[in-house]
Amino acid sequence: MCAKENMKLIKTLKYGLIASSAIAVLSLASLFALYFYLAPQLPSIEGLSDTRLQVPLRIYSSDGALLGEFGEKRRTPKKLEEIPELMQHAFLAAEDNRFYDHGGVDYQGILRAVINLIKTGERGQGGSTITMQLARNFYLSKEKTYTRKIREIFLAFKIERELSKQQILELYLNKIYLGKRAYGVAAASQIYYGKELCELSVAQVAMIAGLPKAPSRYNPIVNPDRALTRRNYVLSRMLALGFISDDVFEQEEMASVTAVRHLSRIQVQAPYVNEMVRAEIVKQFGDEAYSRGLNVYTTIEGKLQQAANESLWNGLVNYDRRHGYRGAVRHVELNEGNPESSLHNDEALIEILKHDGDFGSFKPALVLSIHDEIENGTLKEGSDLGRYARIFLKNGERAILPLQGIAWARPYISLNRVGSEPKRIDEVLRAGDVIWVSKQEDNTWALAQVPEVQGALVAIAPNDGAIQALKGGLNFNRSKFNRATQARRQAGSGFKPVIYSSALSKSFTPASLINDAPVVFEDEALEASWRPENYSGKFFGPTRLRKALYKSRNLVSIRLLRSIGVNYATNFARNFGFDNKGLPHDLSLALGSCEVSPLQMSRAYSVLANGGYLVQPYLIDRIEDMDGSILFEADPAVACVACELAKRNVEQVMPEGNEEEILPGLEVGSEEEILPGLDVGQEEEVLAALPKQAEQTLEPRLTYQMNSILQDVVLRGTGRKAMSLGRKDLAGKTGTTNDQQDAWFNGFHPDLVAIAWVGFDQMKPLGVRETGSQAALPIWIDFMKEALAGVPEKRLKSPEGLMTIKINAETGAAATDLDKDTIFEIFRSENAPKVGVLPPPGVDMDVKTGAPIPEQLF
C-alpha cells in the first residue's frame, strides 16, 4: 500500500517537475519573444546624456552678473563629483538603496509590488529603481500599465548595459523633476533654499531627496506638513543605512521647514536688454534656444545698468510729483464701528489688496484711519485730525504714514497747475483709500504715485558701439515696449549739432555771425507760412554760431540750414548714421522734426565723442554653448584701434615705422607699452590681430570744434545743471520739441555716450517748462554721476591744423588791441581770421559791414 502511494507521489512530482520546467521554458521563451518584439520599439539612449538640450538660456552682463533666464525648465547640470556625497546618499536611501547591487531591476522591489497586487488587487508603484525611473521619466509615459512597466524594465536593462552606474546616477540627479520647475538637485537647491549644493544642511538635503516620489504632494512650499513627514522618513532611511549618525538624525529631525520660493538669482535687473537678446537668440537658434544651455554674454556693465535703472526711475517719479497727486488708486468702504468688520480682520484686509502687486519699490497699502497724534507709540484720536494715517500693507504689516510723507502731494488741477501743499493728511487721504507707499531712507513710509509719463536711457561706448546700459521704460511688466530702440520721437534741438557740423564742413566757423531775428518762411515743403520762434520768445540779433548752438537759438539754426541747403544737410547726416531718405526735406529739420530713437541718437553723438568715427551699436559680445565652447564672438569696428588694444592688453608686434598708419591715435613712444615685443617683418601677423577700423565720417578738426562748442552747452548753455558733476570733460545738447512733447539730453564723455528721453506714449505735452534741461538732464546727471565715479578727466586730443585765436566777441573778427570784449575761438587754419579783416559773412549779414540786412529782419 505504501509502495503504491510512494510511486504515485513520485509520479506526481515527476509530472509537476516536467510541468514546471515547461512553464519555465515557455515563460523564458515568452520573455525573449516579448523582448525581441519590444526591443525595436525601445528608444535609443544616445541622447540620454545630452542634458544640454534641457538647460535654459541665460543672459549675463560683461562682468558675469546674471541678467535673465529663459526656458520652462530650471536646470544647472553638475558632474557627479560636484554633487556632495551626502546628497547622493540621501537619494539612494529614499529611492534605491540597492542601486549599486542590481543590474537595473530590483527583483525584491518587484516582488513587493506583486504581493501588494495580490493583497489589494490594485496596481501600485513599487520596485522602481533609479535606472527605471530614468527610463520612465525621459522616454516613457507615466501611465500605470503592465506594458509600460515591461518596457521600463527592458529599457532599464539597456541603460545599464551601455552606461556606468556613475553615469546613470549623475544623469538622474541632473534630470529628475523636483517641483517648481526645478529639474535636478542643483536647480532645486537654488529654488527652495537659494543655496549652492555644498551649503545645504542635512535636513534640507533630505527634503530635496524626498521630492521625486510626489513633487507636488511633498512640496515643502505647498504642503509643508506632508513634506516634513516625508523628509523625516528620508532621514530615518539615511540613519538605517549608516549614512548619518544618531546625533545628526536627532538634531535634523527637529529642524523646521525653511524652504521658500527663490526666483532666479538675477543680479542686475535689465528686462528690456533681456528681451532684445532673447529675440535675437531665438531668431538664430529657434525654439532650441530655450533648452540648449546657451550662455549669452552682453556688453552691459552691471554698475552702469543699475545706475540707469535708478536714475530713470527717480527722474520720472520726480517729474510726476511736480505735477501733483491724482488721487487714490481706488476707494473701499470700511466699517470702523464693527470689531468683526474688515478693519479689524487681517485676512479680510489682505483680500482687499490681493490683486495689487508691487510696482518697483512701491507697495500697495490700505488707509485704515487718520489720527492727530501718537501717544506711547500708538495712534490717538484727536479733534484736529491729519498728522498721521494708519495703513495696512499686503504682507499683513500695519504701519504709520506721517504727514511729512505726503508733503509732496499737492492736488493735481491741470497739466500746468497744482494746488497748495497739504497741511493735514485728511486733505489728501481718507480711510478706505487704496494707495501706493514707499519706504524712505529713514525707515518711514511715504505716499507714492505710479507715473504716467515714460522715458528711456541708453549708454554706449563711443569707441566701438558697445551698449553698456539700456532702460526702455519705467517698468517692463507694465509695458514691454522698448522706447530706447523702438520709439520714434522728434529729436528737437538735439539734432542741431548735425546741422552745425554740416555748416562747419563748408565755409562757416564757430565765429560766423548769424542773425537771430523774426522771420516768415513760405516753404513749399511745409505747405504753409511758418513763423518759428526761440523758446524764450525773444530775439537777440547777430549771434556767433558757437553761442547760437549752446544757447539753442532756433532762428539761427533755421537760417543756417537755409544757407547750406536742406539736401546738403540731409546727405551730411549720413555721417552720423541717419538715413537721409527718412529725414524731413524742409527747414523744420533745423529744429529736429526728424523722428529718431534714443539708440540712434547715441550712435550719432558717438561720432562727436570718438573723434569722427561711425560705429555700430551692438549688445551681444559672445555666445557660449553649455560646455563653454564659443559659438559667436563680436568683432566690432572701433574708432581708436590703439585704445582698444591697450584695453585688451594684447601682446602683439608692430612693424617699425607704420604705427600711425596701422594704429591711428597711437601716440609716439607708446608702441612698446601697447604692443610689447616689436619686430620688423611681421606686418601680416599684426594686421590679422588688429580690430577692424571704423569708418571716419567727420574730419577730425571739425569734430574737435563741435566738441568744444558742445562743452559750452554744459559750461554756459542749456546744460549748465551738469556742472554739478564737477567735471570739465562733459559735452552735450538738450532737446525739446513743440509743446514740450519730448524732452532729451544727449551728452557724452570721451569714453561714454548717454541719451536720456522723457515723454508720454500718447504724444501729449509734458507741461510748461518741462524742457530737456528740466525733465531729461537730471536723469542724465544722476546716471553719469555713478557711471563716471572714479574715472579721471579726459579730453579729446586736438588734431593738427587748428588755431586758437582771440576774436572780438561781437563781430567774430580777429581782435585788436582796442577791443575790450574778446574771447578765444578755435579755427581751422585755412579759415582763421586776420587782424583788420572781417570774417566771411554769415547768414543774412552784410558782406562789408557785418550788420544784418534790414529787409531780411522780418
Image (cartoon, rainbow, N blue to C red):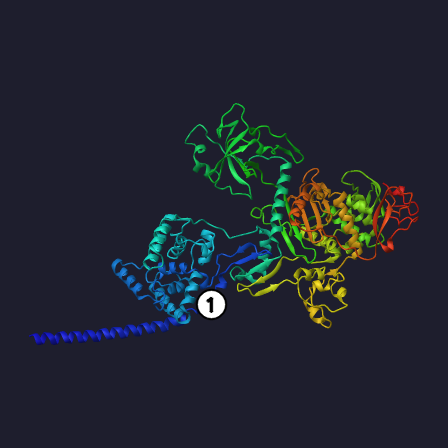
Give the residue displayed 53% in from the left and 60% down from the top.
Answer: 287
- State the residue lying farthest toward the left: 1
Q: Is residue 565 left or right of residue 788?
A: right
User: What kind of element bears circle 1?
Assistant: loop
Q: Quadrant of the N terminus?
A: bottom left
Instruction: Determine which quarter of the picture holds residue 101.
Output: bottom left
Amino acid at dot 1: Gly
- State the residue lying farthest toward the top: 383
Residue situated in front as seen by the camera: 733 or 525: 733
Percent from the top left, x then y, of residue 77?
48, 61
Instruction: Determine which quarter of the picture holds residue 447.
Output: top right
Number of residues whose C-alpha sits closer than 10 Å to that of mark 1, classed few (under 14), some (14–19) or many (20 or more):
few
Q: Mark yes or no: residue 585 visible.
A: no
Q: Is residue 29 left or right of residue 652?
A: left
Give the residue displayed 37% in from the left and 57% down from the top.
Answer: 213
Percent from the top left, x then y, of residue 394?
48, 40
Q: Quadrant of the C terminus?
A: top right
Percent from the top left, x then y, of residue 459?
66, 52
Q: Is residue 746 left or right of residue 116?
A: right
Residue situated in front as seen by the camera: 680 or 616: 680
Percent from the top left, x then y, of residue 246?
33, 54
Q: Is residue 816 left or right of residue 169?
A: right
List the residue tagged with mark 1. 47
Q: Mark yes or no: residue 433 visible.
A: yes
